[in-house]
Image: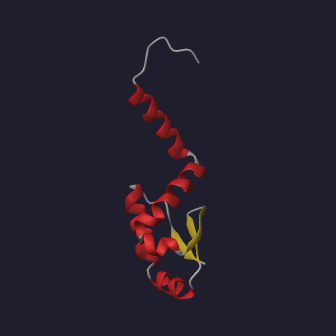
Amino acid sequence: MKRSQPQLLGAIIDQMLTMAERDPQSRSSYIQGLWPKVVGTHIAAYTTKVRLEGGVLHVYISSASLKEQLGYGRALITQKINELLDEPTLDDVLIH
């Protein structure tokens, strides 16, 4: 598409980010990047896999005792991630 008017680089980046927010794969990758910020690096070190499926974040943890502890804080984790996203994207977090 040819444009007759030049655009500022900042405006182009904003357009790209807006388009990426609508893409489910981009949203999933972004939420995966938030996981260490929400739970901390120590817990993130025991995390083997994070994936978003629908409105549910599936988190795979290699430590059984840590799974148990995180299971009690699922509502708080969901709330923190939704706050970082500025919108209610997640319905629940499942710890596997």
Rendered residue at 39%/67% (across/down)? 80
Q: Residue furthest top?
A: 4
Q: How many dots with numbers?
A: 0
**Hey, which quadrant is residue 81 in on the image?**
bottom left
Left or right placement of residue 82 versus residue 27 in this view:
left
Quadrant position of residue 49? bottom right
- Left/right of residue 34 with respect to residue 24 in the rendered view: left
Q: Which of the colour schemes (rainbow, by chain, secondary structure, one colour) is used?
A: secondary structure
Which residue is rendered at x = 42% and y = 62% of the image? 82
Residue situated in front as seen by the camera: 40 or 69: 40
Q: Pick the residue in front: 86 or 71.
A: 71
User: Which quadrant does the N terminus fall into?
Assistant: top right
> Residue 67: x, y in percent?
54, 83
The residue at 44%/70% (across/down) is 41
Relative height, residue 22 to residue 56 (above, below): above
The image quadrant of residue 13 is top left
x, y percentage for residue 52? Answer: 59, 62
The quadrant the C terminus occupies is: bottom right
Image coordinates of residue 87 in percent, x first then y, are 42, 56
Q: Which residue is nearer to you in this view: 90 or 70?
A: 70
Q: Is residue 75 above or below residue 33?
A: below
Is 20 above or below relative to 93?
above
**Residue occupying image coordinates x 43% and y 80%:** 73
- Asked if residue 62 is positioned above or below residue 25 in the image, the reply reads below
